[in-house]
Image (tube, rainbow, N blue to C red):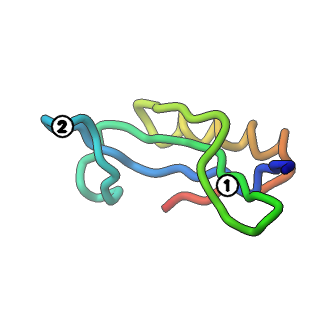
Amino acid sequence: MSLSIQVIYVHAFRNNADGSEYCAEDESPDGWCAFERTETDEGGTFDHGEERDFPTLAAALTWAEGRADLHNCPVEVY
């Protein structure tokens, strides 16, 4: 099974008593997570590889764009 990075996702998160959870940009996020998404040869998708948290969207995008250039894939913010 070979894995290839299909997309780099960037998403806002906020911290809570149980850890953290994704949130919308307009919900006063505590930070931004950027992560690689891979797809298996069988067509299933799952998270894999590098994942980092950043204090700002700008910092997350800088990292994500570098990873996207490395893997020749897009960056999506959601």
- The residue identified by callout 1 is 75
Using a 10 Å C-alpha cutoff, classify the residue at mark 2 as few (fewer than 14 neighbours), some (14 to 19) or many (20 or more). few
User: The disc labelled 2 sits on which kind of residue?
Assistant: Asp
Foreground tag (1 vs 2): 2
Q: Secondary structure at mark 2?
A: loop
Q: Residue at horizontal 18%, vertical 37%?
A: 18
Q: Earlier in the sequence, mark 1 or mark 2?
A: 2
Q: Residue at x 65, y 45 (%)?
A: 36
Residue 26: % across, % down? 28, 58
Residue at screen point 40% across, 30% down: 55
User: Quick one: label 1, few (<14), some, or many (20+) residues within 10 Å?
Assistant: many
**Dot 1 amino acid type:** Val
| Inter-mark Cα distance, 1 to 2 | 28 Å
Q: Is residue 24 above or below residue 56?
A: below
Q: Is residue 3 left or right of residue 38?
A: right
Residue assigned mark 2: 18
Q: Is residue 50 above or below residue 41?
A: above
Q: Secondary structure at mark 1?
A: strand
Quarter where residue 19 is shown:
top left
Picture quadrant of residue 13? top left
